[in-house]
Every structure is written in structure tokens, then in C-alpha cells.
Amino acid sequence: MDVSIIIVNYNTPKLTAETIDSILSSQTKYSYEIIVIDNHSSDHSVQLIKERFPEVKLIVNEENVGFAKANNQGINLSKGRYILLLNSDTIVKEDTIEKMIEFMDKNRRIGASGCKVLLPNGKLDRACHRGFPTPMASFYYLVGLSKLFPKSPRFNQYHLGYMNLDEPHPIDCLVGAFMLVRREVIEQVGLLDEDFFMYGEDIDWCYRIKQAGWEIYYCPFTSIIHYKGASSKKKPFKIVYEFHRAMFLFHKKHYSEKYSFVINSLVYIGIATKFMLSTVVNTFRKIGG
């Protein structure tokens, strides 16, 4: 088996079905399997997947165990020499699987790679092309210096906007919506960290992969569509909480010992402040909506 494609579904039957259909329409010489983990959906997702896609390996969880743990369930069941994490709200092109595996086969030092991820409006999903969120990179991003100086390597460390987005090159972080990883890399660095419920696990994985000496590459010669902005902007409290909790976990795990007490305190205060502001904004959106 060349690649195991892992999709986590949670109450997105139509989007998940479209994602699977796009995979089945792929033009590729490589063998693949599709593994879907349903995270205790309350709709007809499980029934739809069973009826429409009998060839798909389906895991049905009795509770929502989170994105990282669900993907790990799929990885443990997989047989491919590559693992592809693929969001349930994506559409792959006919050549995506073919081109990405060819690229990885030709570049043995690359441990993980991602293609160009486009939003429905054609713009780049910048999460597919990131640097690590160091305190300074995060600060420049939050105060807007990255927007003021988009071509500055110093001020645009977060989204690496100064790089040529039409040429393949090494980066720090991929996005969990599309992440192709070698099996031997996973055997070396371990599975996704299940302390991250639904955000940050991709950044943490990339950090560990690079720490182990592997390269991570952005590959714009093929692309997928990511319906990231298709859902309502009125985010449940759980999503807002987990997003900011992931920031805290990542910094504590990888950076807290590298920085002084003062820097760490400022980072944690910044995360807490951003969380409170996001909660207030989200609350007003609900009231106004």
C-alpha cells in the first residue's frame, strides 16, 4: 500500500462525501486506502459513508475524542508507506496524490510535505505555509508588523510571506488539512500528541519532525480546495477555548524552557488576553446574529 488517507468526520456528511469522491476520482498509479474516523456524529454521517462508500474503512467512536486522537486511531489501522492527513472539508485534484507521492519518493530527506491549500475564493490558506510560532514571530503577527512589512524575513516569520509561494521550498509548519508524512518518520517521532484536542497538533508534529532532522516542504505544483470559511463565523465556546489552549500547550511544551520567566509570563498573558477578547467578540456575534 502506497498511501493511507485518513479523514476525521464530525457532523459533515455532505462535505466528507465530496472529499471521498474527489479522492476516488484521482488519476494515479499509486495504491491507496481511505480510512474515515467518525467522532460520534449526531447526524446520518455513519449511515451515508457505509452505504455510499463500502470500500472505506470506517471507525465509529462512541464519543468525540478530538482530532489528534481520531487521526491516531486511523494511523494505527493504516498500512501505507505514507500517511495523508486530509480534512473532511477538502477537495483534492486528480493529480494531487500522484504528484505529491512522486515528489516524496524523489526526495528521501523530506519527512513531510503539503501542497498548496486554496480557499474557495482562490486565495491561499496561509496555514499551509507557516513558520513556528516563536514569541517574536507571534508578536510581529499579532501587532500587525507582518502585514506592514510582508516581504520582511524578520517581521513575517509567522506566515513566511516573503517566500515565493509558486516554488517548492522548505518551511516549518504544514496544516493538518493536508499533511503527507512518511511512515518511518512516524515510527521515529511518534503519533500526534493527544493533549491537543483539535488545534496545534499539526504544528507540534511538524516541530518534532524537524527536531528529528527531517525536512518539511511546501509543494505548490498541485493544490486542494479547503472549505475553511464555509461554516458560520459564530464559533462555539469549545472551539475558541481549544484554539487558545493549543497555543498555551505548544509554548509550554517546546518553548518555556528556552525563554525567561518574564517572556513566558508575557506569552501566557497574551494568550489569555486574546482568549478573553475572542470570547467577547464571539458572544456579541451570537447576540447580533
Image (tube, rainbow, N blue to C red):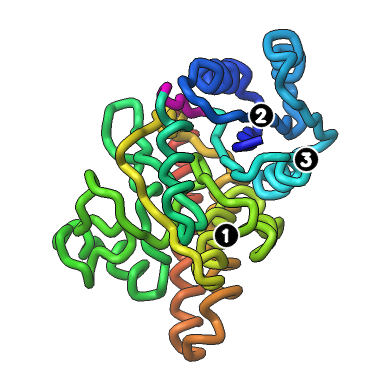
Q: Dividing the picture into quarters, in which one does residue 246 lie?
A: bottom right
Q: Residues within 10 Å of mark 1 (few under 14, many from 20)?
A: many
Q: Residues within 10 Å of mark 3 (few under 14, many from 20)?
A: some
- Amino acid under disc 1: Trp
Query: From the viewer's perspective, is residue 12 above or below residue 113?
Result: above
Expressed as whole percent of the image width and height from the top left, the position of residue 269 reads 48, 73
- Of all residues shown, which one is farthest toward the top? 51
- Amino acid under disc 3: Leu
Of pointers 2 and 3, the one earlier in the residue sequence: 2
Residue at x 79%, y 31% (from the top left corner): 59
Residue at mark 2: 33
Mark sitting on residue 205: 1
Which quadrant does the N terminus fall into? top right
Residue 212 relative to residue 50: left or right: left
- Of all residues shown, which one is farthest toward the right? 62
Of pointers 1 and 2, the one earlier in the residue sequence: 2
Query: From the viewer's perspective, is residue 42 above or below residue 6?
Result: above
Please name which of the two marks, 3 or 1, marks the residue nearer to the observer.
3
Question: Which of the pair 257/166 is nearer the observer?
Answer: 166
Which quadrant does the C terminus fall into? top left
Of pointers 3 and 1, the one earlier in the residue sequence: 3
Residue 94 in sight here: yes
Q: Which residues are magenta?
A: 89-94
Mark sitting on residue 49: none
Give the SS element for disc 2: strand
Residue 20 relative to residue 160: left or right: right
Give the SS element for disc 1: helix
